Each structure stands twice: as structure tokens, then as C-alpha cells.
């Protein structure tokens, strides 16, 4: 049994092998490190005005995406997709929690409230692609203009996770038989 810690979300993973992605926030393997490589004060950062505003935008975005995926997960007539999007909602909630930690505020209290979504899986998957494209490109932009190393690292890592979700939407779309 190994114990690795995610430098992005701070969660500890237990298993025999280091996974390809953090099971909690989706960060890539390069961020899964030994606990010594995760300093206790990793999220104690001095934010610039721009970094604070960018994190606040990100909190709202993750909050909305968490609730959107929870809405998709309510459609249990398709159990595999329902479960997959429940997983995505948990990953987005993890991102929301991380951004809140960096701003040093409490997380929103409606993260477990599903959003009203379409009954049509294909419509929802298409909306997911749009949401993930927006998130991934915003975070790339936020990473590029951040001056703090930790903020840069976090936006870089999370941008890559949202890009992975676009790829996953392709898999889901084929599974659901969408055009
Ligand atoms: Fe993580
Ligand atoms: Fe996210």
C-alpha cells in the first residue's frame, strides 16, 4: 500500500500504484507526490487584486458546474452516465473547495443542490462541452496572468482537468448515441 498526496487538492490517495489522475480533483499524476512535498502552508498565499478576482470568478464557475452535473446525475434511467456525471460533480466541488481555501472563505452552501437540467442527455452533454471549454480557457488565461507560483500551479493543473472533461464528454456522447 502506498500513500500519495495531491499537491493540488491536498487529498491523500491510498493504493498499490500511483493513479494516472487524482481521484478527487482529477489533477494529473505529476501532482501526486509524497507528503513531504506538500508543505502545510501551501495555500497561505498573498493574492493580488487580479488573482483574488480570478479566484472569485472560478468559485462561481465551479459552483455552477457542480450543480449542473448533480442535475445530470439525477437522471438515473441511464445509470452509467448518471454515475459518471456524479463523479464529475464531485471533482468540480473539489475545485470549488480548493479555490475557496485560496481566497480563505467558506465554500458556498448550495453545492449539493442539483440544478434543473434538460431530460435529453445529448443536450446536457453538449452544454457540458461548452462549460468545460469556458473553464479550461479561463483557467489558462488566469494561470498566464498570475504572479504567484502557487496560483499559477493550481490554475494550470485545473485547466488541464477541465480539458480532460471535454474528452470525457466525447466518450459520454458516443455512449448515449448522440450525433
Ligand atoms: Fe487532487
Ligand atoms: Fe472544475
Image (tube, rainbow, N blue to C red):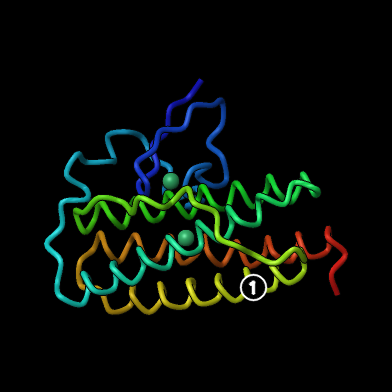
Q: Residues within 10 Å of mark 1 (few under 14, many from 20)?
A: some
Query: In the displayed structure, does residue 131 sit left or right of residue 119?
Result: left
Q: Residue at x 59, y 57 (%)?
A: 69
Looking at the image, which is closer to me, 103 or 74? 74
Taking the spot 69% from the left edge, 73% from the top edge, the residue there is 126
Question: Residue 118, position in %: x, y?
Answer: 70, 67
Q: Is residue 131 above or below residue 2?
A: below
Residue positioned 64% across, 73% down in the render: 127
- Quick one: which residue is furthest to the top in this view? 1
Q: Residue lying farthest front?
A: 116
Asked where in the image residue 59 lies, by quadrant, the reply is bottom left
Residue at left offset 54%, top offset 52%? 89
Q: Position of residue 165 (x, y in %)?
A: 60, 62
149 lies left or right of 77 = left
Give the image location of residue 25, x and y in percent.
47, 49
Vertical position of residue 85 compared to residue 37: above or below: below
Position of residue 98 in the picture relative to residue 126 (left or right): left
Disc 1: which residue: 127
Position of the C terminus by quadrant: bottom right
Percent position of residue 78, x then y: 80, 49
Per the image, label 1 sits on a secondary structure element best described as: helix
Q: Is residue 116 left or right of residue 26?
A: right
With respect to residue 129, does 27 lie above or below?
A: above
Amino acid at each position: 500500500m502506498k500513500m500519495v498526496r495531491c499537491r493540488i487538492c491536498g487529498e491523500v490517495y491510498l493504493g498499490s500504484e500511483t493513479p494516472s489522475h487524482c481521484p478527487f480533483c482529477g489533477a494529473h499524476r505529476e501532482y501526486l507526490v509524497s507528503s513531504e512535498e506538500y508543505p502545510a502552508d501551501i495555500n497561505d498565499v498573498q493574492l493580488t487584486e487580479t488573482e483574488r478576482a480570478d479566484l472569485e470568478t472560478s468559485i462561481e464557475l465551479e459552483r455552477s458546474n457542480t450543480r449542473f452535473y448533480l442535475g445530470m446525475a439525477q437522471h438515473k434511467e441511464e445509470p452509467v452516465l448518471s454515475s459518471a456525471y456524479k463523479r464529475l460533480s464531485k471533482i468540480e466541488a473539489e475545485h470549488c473547495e480548493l479555490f475557496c481555501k485560496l481566497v480563505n472563505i467558506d465554500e458556498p452552501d448550495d453545492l449539493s443542490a442539483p440544478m434543473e437540467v434538460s431530460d435529453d442527455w445529448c443536450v446536457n452533454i453538449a452544454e457540458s462541452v461548452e462549460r468545460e471549454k469556458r473553464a479550461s480557457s479561463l483557467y489558462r488565461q488566469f494561470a498566464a496572468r498570475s504572479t504567484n507560483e502557487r496560483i499559477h500551479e493550481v490554475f494550470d493543473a485545473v485547466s488541464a482537468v477541465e480539458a480532460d472533461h471535454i474528452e470525457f464528454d466525447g466518450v459520454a456522447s458516443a455512449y448515449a448515441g448522440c450525433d
